[in-house]
């Protein structure tokens, strides 16, 4: 069990570019979550998957954001036409469905800086 | 997005002192979690609470689920330098979703 892995750890991009982040959850975990954390704030929910199905999306997830979990294993979060306001830490977490009430395990995050 | 209110926002304490922090919400929650986050890392789960009035310990940490179900408290006894970090509460409103709403965080600094 290597924990939740996120890549890259840091990404600097120019405004208007597209970026994609990857999350590899703990192998047996069937639920996967994406959160966003801006400086000085707590994590804010973006979306979550149960296996490959995207079950809930936040209003924070504008049409420039898309998340996928095609085979129910790893997930990707893509941001199109990045804006400076997208600069944040993007956190992925996972849990077992049966244990989801016990909270979930976060990865170390991908820090995005849009310049 | 919605965030829970945590108090205090930050605190400096001497090593060996006890620490108390709390988290309040305008909504009733059925699960409360407490996480700790170190710089540049993701949050790590410390304690989970499931019933109003529940008191749960994890080593020097003790957390309580408020009886109104709108608040929770975290205490750290005999603080040590590695307790430095940001502590977040998180709550889940309803069954059927595993989306948690996080607090604004309490930043703890321990002076040796």
Image (tube, coloured by chain):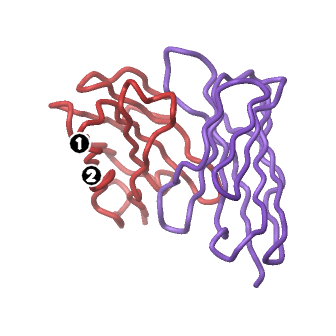
Chain colours: A red, B purple
Quadrant of the drawing holding the C terminus of chain B: bottom right
Mark 2 → mark 1, Cα distance in angstroms: 7 Å
Q: Does residue B92 appear left or right of residue A71 in this picture?
A: right
Q: Secondary structure at mark 1?
A: loop
Could you say which quadrant of the image residue B94 lies in?
A: top right
Image coordinates of residue B36 in percent, x first then y, are 60, 56
**Residue at figure coordinates x 38%, y 31% from the top left:** A63
Closer to the chain start, of discs 2 and 1, is 2
Q: Does residue B101 appear left or right of residue B108 in this picture?
A: left
Label 1 resides on the chain identified as A
Instruction: Name the mark on residue A72.
Output: none
**Residue at figure coordinates x 64%, y 66% from the top left:** B85
Residues at marks 2 and 1 on the same chain: yes
Q: Secondary structure at mark 2?
A: loop
Image coordinates of residue A26 in percent, x first then y, are 29, 45
Image coordinates of residue A68 in percent, x first then y, are 25, 34
Image coordinates of residue A94 in percent, x first then y, are 37, 39
Closest to the observer, A6 or A26: A26
Asked whether disc 2 touches disc 1, contact meaning CB atoms under 8 Å apart, the reply is yes
Q: Is residue B80 above or below residue B29?
A: below
Label 2 resides on the chain identified as A
Circle 2 crowding by C-alpha within 10 Å: few under 14, some 14–19, many from 20: few
Instruction: Name the mark on residue A27.
Output: 1
**Residue at figure coordinates x 63%, y 28% from the top left:** B31
**Residue at figure coordinates x 78%, y 77% from the top left:** B15
Mark 2 lies on residue: A1
Q: Is residue A105 above or below residue B41?
A: above
Circle 1 crowding by C-alpha within 10 Å: few under 14, some 14–19, many from 20: some
Closest to the observer, A3 or A85: A3
Mark in the foreground, 2 or 1: 2
Could you say which quadrant of the image residue A100 lies in?
A: top left
């Amino acid at each position: 069990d290597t924990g939740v892995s996120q890549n890259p750890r840091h990404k600097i991009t120019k405004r208007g570019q597209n970026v994609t982040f990857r999350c590899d959850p703990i192998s047996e975990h069937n639920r996967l979550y994406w959160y966003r954390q801006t400086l000085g704030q707590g994590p804010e929910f973006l979306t979550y998957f149960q296996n490959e199905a995207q079950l809930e999306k936040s209003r924070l997830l504008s049409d420039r954001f898309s998340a996928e979990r095609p085979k129910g294993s790893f997930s990707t979060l893509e941001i199109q036409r990045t804006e400076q306001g997208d600069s944040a830490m993007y956190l992925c977490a996972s849990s077992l469905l049966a244990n989801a009430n016990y909270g979930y395990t976060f990865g170390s995050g991908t820090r995005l800086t849009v310049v | 997005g919605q965030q829970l209110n945590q108090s205090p926002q930050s605190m400096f304490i001497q090593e060996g002192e006890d620490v108390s922090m709390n988290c309040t919400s305008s909504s009733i929650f059925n699960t409360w979690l407490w996480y700790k986050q170190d710089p540049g890392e993701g949050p790590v789960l410390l304690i989970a609470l499931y019933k109003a009035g529940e008191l749960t310990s994890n080593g020097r940490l003790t957390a309580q689920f408020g009886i109104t179900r709108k608040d929770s408290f975290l205490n750290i006894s005999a603080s040590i330098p590695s307790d430095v970090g940001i502590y977040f509460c998180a709550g889940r409103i309803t069954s059927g979703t595993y989306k948690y709403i996080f607090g604004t965080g309490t930043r703890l600094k321990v002076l040796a």
